[in-house]
Amino acid sequence: MGRVKVNLTIDAELSREARALGLNMSRVAEAAIAKVAREERNRRWRQDNRAALDAYAEEVERDGLPLARFRSF
């Protein structure tokens, strides 16, 4: 994947501290955005699939795990 330039505005003191620590702010921002995007994607998936997840949970509670008889522990 290629890289693109974006403009970010951050707190001035935070910027000074990051520079003093030798942090690569682009990489740190990229990692943070990737983490938040992953969390939001997962949250939306759970929201979109809530009915199926609830139905499966009810089925397991009512009937037990589908392959429970084959468990050796």
Image: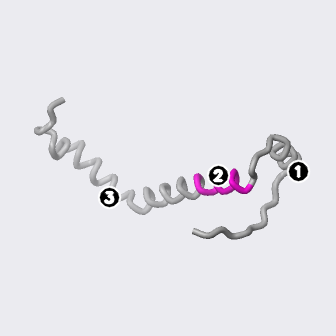
* Circles 1 and 2 in contact, beta carbons < 8 Å: no
* Circles 3 and 1 in contact, beta carbons < 8 Å: no
**Lower position in the chain sequence, tag 3 or tag 1:** 1
Give the CA distance from mark 2 to mark 3. Answer: 30 Å
Q: What is the magenta segment's predominant secondary structure?
A: helix
Residue annotated with mark 2: 32
Give 58 or 65, whichever is nearer the viewer.
65
Q: Position of residue 56 (x, y in %)?
A: 27, 52
For label 2, the SS is helix
Q: Left or right: 37 with respect to 44?
A: right
Quadrant in which the C terminus appears: top left
Residue annotated with mark 1: 12
Give 65 or 73, whichever is nearer the viewer.
73
Can you name the residue that lies furthest to the left here?
69
Q: Quadrant of residue 67?
A: top left
Give 38 or 59, whichever is nearer the viewer.
38
Q: Over which residues does the magenta segment extend? A: 26-35
- Snapshot colouring: one colour
Residue 52's disc is 3
Q: Residues within 10 Å of mark 3 (few under 14, many from 20)?
A: few
For label 3, the SS is helix
Q: Quadrant of residue 69?
A: top left
Amino acid type for the residue under numbered disc 3 = Ala
Q: Position of residue 20 (x, y in %)?
A: 85, 42
Question: Above or below — where is 68 with respect to 31?
Answer: above
Amino acid type for the residue under numbered disc 2 = Ala
Give the CA distance from mark 3 to mark 1. Answer: 46 Å
**Lower position in the chain sequence, tag 2 or tag 3:** 2
